[in-house]
Image (cartoon, rainbow, N blue to C red):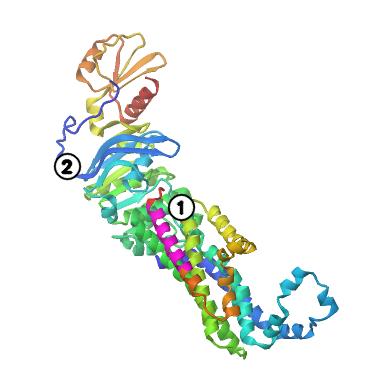
Amino acid sequence: MLERRISEKESGSIGAEKKALVIKGLDKVYKGDVHAVKEIDFDVNEGEVHALLGPNGAGKTTTIKSVLGFIHYQGDIRVFNEKIDDVRPNVAFVPEDKSFYEFMTPEMAIKVCTRIVDQFDPNRAFDFMRRFSLPMKKKIKGFSHGMKTSLYLSLCLAQKASLYIFDEPTWGLDPIRRDDVLEIIRNLVIDGKTVLYTSHIISEVEKIADRISILFDGRILFSGYTDDIKADFRVFYLPLDEQLPNHYQFLSSQKDREKLVILTADEKTIHFLRQAEQAEEVVPNLEMFFQTLLRGKHYA
Amino acid sequence: MLKKTMMEMQFRIILLVLFFILMLVVLIATRPFIDEIMAQMNFDSEQMKNLPDFFKNMLAETTQLSKMVEDDQFFLLSQWYSKNFGQFLPLFVLIMVFPLFAKEVDKGTIFFLLSKKNRPSIFWGKVLPGYMVVMGITLFFVFIAPLVMMLSGYSVAFTPQLLAMIVQQLISVTFFFALFMFFSVVFNDQIKPVLAGILVCFGLPFFSMFEGTKWLNPYPYVLGQSVLTKGHFDGIYSLVLLILTAAIVWVGLGVFKKKEF
């Protein structure tokens, strides 16, 4: 059995947390019979950073678009136990495409947001823009990708929301600015906010995410706490001719050159594999976990 | 959203207002010369009779031309409302309205609005300010032309005939606003609403080619020809256009509420 989800009970948290977001049976088929998301269930606890990971086309953006009501879908999505339209002022969003009105300057953008966006704090927006060293009187049209991302983040973070949704929030940023943004996102949670977050950069997810959900081909392959990955999971490299009993459980298995790579959290399986000759055991970091899981799905 | 819409339309507002001002200045400045040109033209001459029909049509009926020479009020109605300003009205509305929604989708800024507001709020937040801007410019130019002519010493007044033409043009602008706004909602890029709008602007007159479809061409109404020829306001056509406008806006709202982004 390759797929496994860690329940909150298994991972030590008893499901008593309040839910900021609950998705049940989310299914989305685009025109042309493109099945982007296939009946997925997952939730985001209040006060956590939940990262949605997956390769291109896995269904991350479709999931976020469904949560925000940008597209039609099958299934049920509740944000703070309500429909999205009833709690929209409490949700701030940074899209994958950080396009803002190019004829505006950051100063004008703040003025417009003050009028349009509920619970928007212009002073906070000014503070973030200063922190990101944005030129306040320059038109956004002349901004680099990184500056556009910084501007969008500043406007989003200036909204006093309870749930922040970031789709690739560090896209185009230099490493120093990226670390600043990760720190800001982490601080949101310290202030009691909730963050749903997608990224291709696994190392940054490892720094800030409390929980992750890994999407692949429209399905959730794994959902659990990042701390549990190191505690519970093991990767074993075995000779290709190693015979494995059928009843042992793996999250993923793959052939990698001259090795058989097994990802598992099952105690009996771990015990068995530790006895195997020439078996090499590795405690996976998130990057290895992600790669092994996805490559295993590809070649299993 | 009014300020944001104004900012988005700023360039087009300035350009079109300057264009209309120039058009008005040229029209009033050439008024004395038209008198002279007409006075020198002999419509009964052999030369004039030998002109091709299409050229004669371009010159319009000689009786109307003579009337235009003598009557400042008729000059205003026929040259400002029925020609220069009136003929440009649908294109003016198209230029102002086509990017209303299409640009937001094309440029990806629609996600900013969709994440902040519910769809009906976004729809009305864009439609109402857009309509106010378009209507504001139209109102300015339908009223400024007679006022400028009065100040220039011409014998012009706000007669019931003039007011009827103004109301018909305001209703026409409302109708075209709704139609072009609908194109902007339906399409996801900025090219298709323009093409659809141009097709409407230049395609509608072709309905006049057949007796049975003449009524589908709104230009005689837009240009106030019924007011000029019959001397009264076209109530039925106005009502039909207003009902159509309401229907288009209602369908536009429905499409926007259901649309995927």
Which chain is disc 2 placed on?
A: A
Viewer-proximal residue among A184 and B31? B31
Q: Per the image, is B247 magenta?
A: yes
Quadrant where the N terminus of chain A lies? top left
The picture places residue A261, in percent across and down from the top left corner, at 34, 18
Q: Do the residues labelled 1 and 2 touch (CB within 8 Å)?
A: no
Q: What's the magenta bit mostly, secondary-structure-wise?
A: helix
Camera-nearest residue between A188 and B223: B223
Of badges 1 and 2, the one in the foreground is 1
- Amino acid identity at mark 2: Glu
The residue under the point 20% across, 31% down is A7
Q: Which image quarter is the C terminus of chain A in?
A: top left
The image quadrant that residue B54 belongs to is bottom right
- Residue B148 in the figure: left or right of residue B131: right
According to the image, label 1 marks what residue? B105
Q: How far apart are marks 1 and 2 (CA)?
A: 38 Å
Q: Is residue B91 above or below residue B166?
A: above
Q: Residue A17 carries which label?
A: 2
Q: Which span of residues is magenta-colored?
A: B240-257
Is residue A213 shown above or below A184?
above
Residue A248 percent coordinates (x, y)? 24, 15
Three-letter code, disc 1: Val
**Of A14 and A39, the residue lying toward us:** A39
Residue A91 coordinates in the image, percent (x, y): 29, 52
Residue A21 location, quadrant:
top left
